[in-house]
Structures are given as structure tokens and as C-alpha cells.
């Protein structure tokens, strides 16, 4: 019979046979963040809807079309976390993290919710690994954030990713850029989508983010932000490039980058991979020097990135995952030969677990033969047999599941024996 309930469209269950891969990616990310001295921050799964509307921007696809918004019983409008940056900056302001001085270097690993058309690598709930470095205006921190992701890809052994780098200017250069973009699109704007027409007046840079295929074609040859930067932005971009070059982090300058969120200024980057669909990127990020102010705080520069775990795993799987093996799950399986041995088996399991070993045993009153089959199926390193003879002699029969050798070990020595094997 087909199951009555399924996971909601665009979401997925991570099952035990896959969760070790997730753990490996997340552990590698945490490890690299540790090396770069980023500390974890956890924000709520939902926020005031207005936080995203203000921070990410009313005119963006995320806020306009993709948010999971609901009213709670108190009549508040809330939204499931639609991205990670606005909540982190909100927390930074709320808890006065600036007062500790210096740059706040934060990371997160959390689910994000967007009502998107589901397909490979695109989900309605995805998990994002991200960092936010808040408080430093200089180009060196931009390079550090990009280098951190580069090192993370090295840590998980992913090859073939390419970092695309650009600058989208600041509020000083934006008016000139908007003017040239309006001039470029003026002859066609009447035929373009509703979204583009609305953005033509308010923020023509957003037109470059439209996904309608005809509009994508129309923007070929559109003026690039890189050609219209003010002196300060040009200098900043040169500084980022110089720092990346000094660190030997490879990248390509790509003036076509337009990030889908309004808070960006200056540095913008995306990491792409041939294993993903042409429209999907592995990682995206940039500088958001105006965001804290947009959220009612003092001017505070910031930069960060986000990268989806599902996409990382998709490209890892596509490239073979060389050297990725699940860690052995079980060290010992205790097999009880008779009903009388069941309780002693559970006590032995308790003892061995206290000694740090991973131990399992039968809970379905199976025959000894079936328990031995289970030991093999679970890939346990040892079987510990407890029967009448063992109980009388206060011993355990240990069977090495690789060699098939068996030996009788005094019960008090079992933990020590198995631990030595682990080492
Ligand atoms: P974003 O480009 O919207 O940026 O998302 C960042 C990453 O999340 C994407 O590159 C992709 O790997 C993953 N992602 C996004 N949407 C989906 C989806 N529907 N399914 C699977 N994966 C997805 C941000 O969210 C910014 N907050 C990043 C940032 C941090 N900028 C500065 N700091």
C-alpha cells in the first residue's frame, strides 16, 4: 500500500545511509571555520516578515515570490528563514555585538525556506552553510571569506569549482549605473516582463536578475557595473583582487554577476560548478555595507556567503566522492544464545558503552543464527556471544568478524580487549 503521507513537495528526508555524508560536509565546514576563527551563531527558524522585506528587498524574487509567510496566533506576520544574512545582522544589532570591537566573524549551518520550483539542486527547504564577517570595511576580509570557502572545498576534496568575482558598486556609483542601464533597456522595456518593468524605474540593476528567458536574451551586451564604479569602489575591488592574488586563490572576474538580494554593495561573488544546472550556483555572497543601517542600526560594513549542502553533495556525488567511506558504524554486536542470556547481554552492552564502544544487540528475540547474520549485516567488527557456558564461567566469546577467529575472554577484560582493537 502506498504510504498516505509524503514529505512536502520540494523537501527531502536525509536517511541513515546518506546522513554520514551530510555530517562529513558539515564537520569539514566547522573545522575550516575553526581554523579561520569564525564562531557559530544560531538564529530562530522564523523572523518578522519585515526583516526580510527590508533587508533582502521588496523587489527581489525571494521576498516577492518565495517566502513562507504566516500569521501567528498573536496576529504577527512571520516568515520562515528565507536567507541567513538579515537574521545574523539583526542578532548582531540586537545583542550589540559591535561593542566587543574588531570584526565579528560568525558562521551558521541551518535550513532555509524558499517556495521555488523544485528540481535537482533546488528545494523548498535547503540547508545552508554560511559565514558573515561584520565590522571590517577593508578588502582583506573579502579575500579571507573567499579563501575560507576555497579551503573548505579543498577539505571535502571537491574539484572543478570556479570562483567568479565582481563589484556591483555602492550607492555613490549606483545612480550613474542605473542611468546607463535605463538607457540600454529603454527601447525594449515595453516588451519585457512585469517584474522588469517595475524594476526599470526603482532599481534597473534588478532587471539583470530576471529569469524570464526572453528577458535574459535582451540583456546581452548590457552595461556592466564594473565599468561604472566610483573611485572608492574601484580601489576596493583592486584591493580584493590583490589580496586574493597574494593568497593564490584562483578566480575569474565576471561582470555579469548580479546577486538576487538587494543588500549587496561592492564585492559580489559566486562559485559555479559544471555538475550543477546552468542557473544554479554552488555558493553566493558579497559585501552588504548598507544592511545594518537598513535594519535601523549604525552604519556597519559586512561580508559573507552562503552555500547549499544539497548542491555540495550533488556535485560531490557527480565527481565520484573519491576516498569517501562511511566510518564503521558498530564495533560490537552482542548475541544472546538463550533467553536467560538476554538480560546479561544488555548489562554487558551498558558496560561496554560506558567504556566508549559502539554496541548493539537484538531486541526482537531472534535466534542465535539470525543474530549472527545481523552482526554481519551491520558490519560489526566483533560479535560477543553470551550463552549458558559463558554465563557459568563469567566469560564472553569474542568472534573477530573479519578473520572468523574466536576466543574466550574473561568478562572483566572484554572492554579492554575491544578498546585496544579500536586503537
Ligand atoms: P543565495 O545566493 O540566495 O544567497 O543563496 C546562497 C546559496 O544557497 C546558493 O548559492 C545555493 O548554494 C544555496 N541555495 C539557495 N537557494 C537554494 C535552493 N532553493 N535549493 C538548494 N540550495 C539553494 C544568500 O542566501 C545570501 N544570504 C548569502 C550571503 C551571505 N551573502 C552574504 N552573506
Image: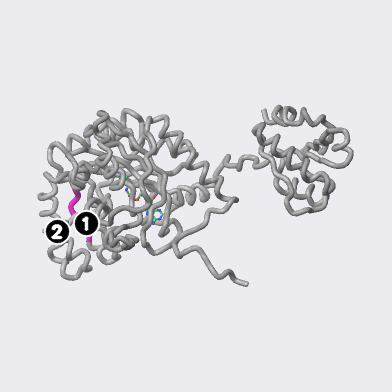
Based on the picture, tell me whether residue 308 belongs to the magenta stretch. no
Q: Residue at x 25, y 58 (%)?
A: 60
- The residue stretch that appears in magenta: 219-226
Identify the residue at horizontal 18%, vertical 44% (top origin). Answer: 293
Answer few, some or many: residues within 10 Å of disc 1's Cα (few below 14, many 20 plus, some between 14 and 19): many
Q: Coloured how? A: one colour
Report whether 228 appears left or right of 31: left
Q: Which mark is residue 234?
A: none
> Where on the picture, by quarter, is residue 125?
bottom left
Disc 1 designates what residue?
Answer: 206
What residue is shown with label 2? 202
**91 or 340: which is nearer to us?**
340
What residue is drawn where x is 67% and y is 27%?
Answer: 423
Q: Quadrant of residue 135?
A: top left
Look at the picture and state if 272 lies above or below 299.
below
Q: Are marks 2 and 1 in contact (CB under 8 Å)?
A: yes
The relative height of residue 283 versus residue 398 in the rendered view (above or below) is below
| x and y, in percent, of residue 46 in the image | 35, 53
Q: Position of residue 233 (x, y in %)?
A: 17, 39
Q: Distance between the residues labelled 2 and 1?
A: 9 Å
Kind of element beneath mark 1? helix
Visible in this render: residue 66? no
Amino acid at each position: 500500500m502506498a504510504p498516505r503521507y509524503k514529505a512536502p513537495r520540494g523537501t527531502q528526508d536525509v536517511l541513515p545511509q546518506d546522513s554520514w555524508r551530510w555530517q562529513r560536509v558539515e564537520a569539514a565546514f566547522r573545522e575550516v571555520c575553526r581554523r579561520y576563527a569564525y564562531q557559530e551563531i544560531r538564529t530562530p527558524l522564523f523572523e518578522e516578515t519585515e526583516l526580510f522585506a527590508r533587508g533582502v528587498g521588496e523587489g527581489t524574487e525571494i521576498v516577492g515570490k518565495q517566502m513562507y509567510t504566516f500569521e501567528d496566533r498573536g496576529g504577527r506576520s512571520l516568515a520562515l528563514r528565507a536567507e541567513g544574512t538579515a537574521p545574523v545582522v539583526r542578532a548582531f544589532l540586537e545583542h550589540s555585538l559591535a561593542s566587543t570591537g574588531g570584526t565579528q566573524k560568525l558562521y551558521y549551518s541551518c535550513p532555509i525556506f524558499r517556495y521555488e520550483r523544485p528540481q535537482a539542486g533546488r528545494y523548498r527547504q535547503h540547508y545552508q552553510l554560511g559565514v558573515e564577517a561584520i565590522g571590517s570595511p577593508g578588502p582583506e576580509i573579502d579575500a579571507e571569506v573567499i579563501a575560507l570557502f576555497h579551503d573548505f572545498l579543498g577539505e571535502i576534496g571537491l574539484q572543478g569549482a570556479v570562483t567568479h568575482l565582481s563589484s556591483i558598486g555602492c550607492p555613490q556609483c549606483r545612480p550613474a549605473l542605473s542611468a546607463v542601464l535605463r538607457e540600454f533597456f529603454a527601447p525594449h522595456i515595453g516588451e519585457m516582463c512585469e517584474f522588469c518593468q517595475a524594476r526599470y524605474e526603482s532599481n534597473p540593476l534588478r532587471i539583470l536578475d530576471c529569469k524570464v528567458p526572453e528577458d535574459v536574451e535582451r540583456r546581452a551586451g548590457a552595461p556592466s557595473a564594473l565599468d561604472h564604479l566610483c573611485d572608492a569602489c574601484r580601489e576596493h575591488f583592486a584591493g580584493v583582487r590583490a589580496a586574493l592574488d597574494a593568497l593564490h586563490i584562483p578566480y575569474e572576474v565576471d561582470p555579469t554577476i548580479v546577486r538576487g538580494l538587494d543588500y549587496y554593495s561592492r564585492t559580489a561573488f559566486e562559485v559555479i560548478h559544471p555538475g550543477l544546472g546552468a542557473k544554479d550556483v554552488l555558493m553566493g555572497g558579497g559585501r552588504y555595507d548598507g544592511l545594518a543601517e537598513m535594519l535601523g542600526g549604525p552604519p556597519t560594513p559586512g561580508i559573507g556567503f552562503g552555500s547549499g549542502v544539497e548542491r555540495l553533495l550533488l556535485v560531490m556525488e557527480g565527481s565520484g566522492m573519491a576516498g569517501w567511506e562511511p566510518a564503521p558504524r558498530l564495533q560490537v554486536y552482542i548475541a544472546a544464545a538463550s533467553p536467560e542470556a538476554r538480560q546479561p547481554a544488555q548489562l554487558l552492552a551498558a558496560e561496554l558503552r560506558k567504556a566508549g564502544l559502539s554496541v548493539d544487540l537484538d531486541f526482537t528475540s531472534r535466534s542465535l543464527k539470525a543474530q549472527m547474520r545481523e552482526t554481519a549485516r551491520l558490519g560489526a567488527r566483533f560479535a560477543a556471544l553470551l550463552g549458558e557456558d559463558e554465563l557459568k564461567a563469567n566469560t564472553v566469546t569474542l568472534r573477530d568478524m573479519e578473520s572468523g577467529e574466536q576466543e574466550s575472554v574473561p568478562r572483566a577484560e572484554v572492554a579492554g580487549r575491544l578498546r585496544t582493537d579500536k586503537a
